[in-house]
Amino acid sequence: MEREHFQENLYVSGHTACPGCGQSMAARLVLNVAGPNTMIANATGCLEVFSTKAPETAFGVPWIHSLFENAAAVASGVEASLKAQGKLSTVRVIAQAGDGGTADIGLQALSGMLERGHDVLYVCYDNEAYMNTGIQRSGLTPFEANTTTTPLGKNSAGNPTYKKPLVEICAAHHIPYAASASVGFPQDLQKKVKKALDIRGPKFLHVHVPCPLGWISEPAGTLEVAKLAVQTGLFPLVEYEYGKLARVFKLPAPKPVEEYLKTQGRFRHIVKSPQELAKVQQTADKNIEFYGLK
Amino acid sequence: MKQFLEGSWALAESVKLCRPQVVSAYPITPQTHIVEHLAQFVANGDLKAESVNVESEHSAASLVLGSEAVGSRSFTCTSSQGLFLMAEVVFNIAGMRLPVMMVCANRAVSAPINIWNDQQDSVSLRDSGWIQLQAENNQEAVDLIIAGYKIGEDPKIMLPVMVCVDGFILTHGMETVDVPSQAEVDKFLPAYNPPYKLDVADPMSLGLLGDPTVYHENRYALHRTLLETIPLIEQTGKDFKAQFGRDSVRLVEEYKLDDAEIALVAMGSVCGTIKDTIDEQRAKGVKVGLLKIVSYRPFPDEAIKKALAKATYIGIVDKNISLGATGANYAEVKALMPADKKVSGFVAGLGGRDITPCTIQGIINDTKGAVNVCKFVDLNEKILFGEFKV
């Protein structure tokens, strides 16, 4: 693509993302803050598939995709290369991947990148399942979500486990900055990207991004759904600096989880069951208490 | 300058002379000494490179993929399970046309776990799209690294190169090696200037999705380019000889094949033992010679056919086994041979079992006898059929 296509946005439309794709919106928000002097290492996943089908690309910055689990290692190589060439002071490196590529198959490479101290911002776009392969459960799929590998049945109420504490895992590396954000709060997201990119060293950003197809939600409601996840306490927005909780997005009056769950078909069975609903409410309450959100 | 060096040290010296800008590896026996020496060079300031100690071979390969894509000459090194853990990245690096250099210190693969030498690891990745060059001795290994960078980085080629050296036998063996001077290497191998790279001044996307409308052509192009390296390896070998005076860089080496009735075919350090055995046999009047394969990928069909044209009996010695079929070189060489030749395959030296002159003599005798497709030599009947309690 010619450069003029990228005058207003560094990530442009014309790609093949589903309507209402939260990941696609978040990727644009992130890149537009990062600016043209950015290089991206992208993991395999929805974002990669819908943005860069040969011979087209939606990216107006240098972008590389290698494999599923190695975005952090490829980004480490990009950074080391820029360092060797004396260019690292002027170029920002971003690694980006989905929840599976980050919290499951890519966790080792991510930990290595954080521990070695590479000057990279790693962004995980969390749509809470393996969406690219057809909505299979990941380590970041929430409790009792109905996915194709945690289906409902006589002996199953959906995903039996809770979301892996990804931000805490990253923060435990005592990196300068590890935070969560949501596409439902774009200004907060962009502020965090800017803050992260002003820091030299390893940074991690966990971004919650609804997937209308996988969550069975209204494509036009993506931002509203994302907001509700935050407002109910199910996806807390937090910032860690050097391993310590530094700031949280306060919720003086958290909404009941039902308001969030009822927007999505994957939770329909929970909304119908007061008992299951109470369990999810408990998850939110624990978050509110743990992070001091009120 | 001629020096008496441990193989790994000599290889590390060669890598240093090529001025890699990024080095990344993960420890695995018997590759370790090579990266230890490189780390020391960096620590001493003798090599100006980013040396990154990663958490796995998968990340080592991924890291040099990323660094090479930004235009830095890069190096990694592994063995056996490490190469297998890298496997998907190895295929990926070739498909993305990034001329990374890797030394594979050849080692047997699990199970059973075994740290000693055979060539199963690199042979198993022969379909990855890498140029694979197998060294007989440390001098060849030193030379193939320097020439390998030049071949892989040729703007018309842009392919990764794996220089394979038999683990322990070469990596830990002491030999006299002529290590070229920095000025000589700089003259032969100019600074890396790739025709494409990631650059904020000229953004490009690398590693796109290739759907059925383009994938087939991509793989064809990769295959064709690999075949196009055959004349380039020959030309680079001539240029290398002109500058350094050595014949190390070639597709194959013919040893006493001119009048040979029996020809053995082999790869790597075992060729030294074979050459000695040939000399002994020739003194007794046996007309035997050796075809050493240096370029395993691309596979030099024409050079092999030409070299074996005169011999009647061909014995192929494989330090690998395509389980359930035959040795890898047997299958490919046999396919090139006319029906009137007697072609036998021998699997030898797996997991570090010594291949002695006596073994080779047995292979020579067998080659002249009834045809074998896949004979495991030196099998110990007691181990096969005896009782074991663990």
Image (cartoon, coloured by chain):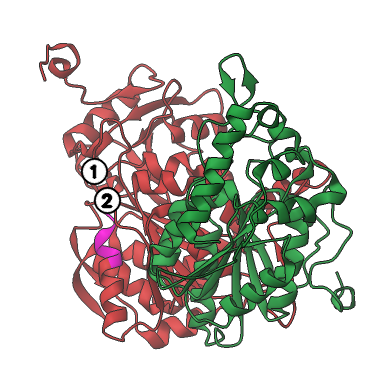
Q: Nearer the viewer, residue B195 or A214?
A: A214
**Foreground: B373 or B279?**
B373
Q: Quadrant of residue A245?
A: bottom left
Looking at the image, tell me whether mark 1 or mark 2 is earlier in sequence order.
1
Q: Which residues are the magenta region?
A: B29-35
Q: Quadrant of the N terminus of chain A?
A: bottom right
Can see residue B308? yes
x and y percent of residue B20 in the render?
44, 75
For the residues beneath circles 1 and 2, the answer to whether they share a chain is yes
Q: CA distance from mark 1 to mark 2?
A: 9 Å
Circle 1 Cα neighbour tier, 10 Å, few/some/many (<14 / 14–19 / ≥20)? many
Residue that mark 1 sits on: B115
**Which residue is depicted at the point 77% across and 41% down?**
A263
Q: Going by the image, does A216 lie left or right of B207?
A: right
Q: Amino acid at mark 2?
A: Gly
The percent position of residue A238, horizontal first and vertical second, equals 54, 65
At horizontal 13% and vertical 12% (from top left) the residue drawn is: B386
Q: Is residue A163 above or below residue B25?
A: above
Tag 2 residue? B167
Palette colour of chain B: red
Q: Residues within 10 Å of mark 2 (few under 14, many from 20)?
A: many
Q: In this view of the protein, which residue sits in the foreground, B252 or B45?
A: B45
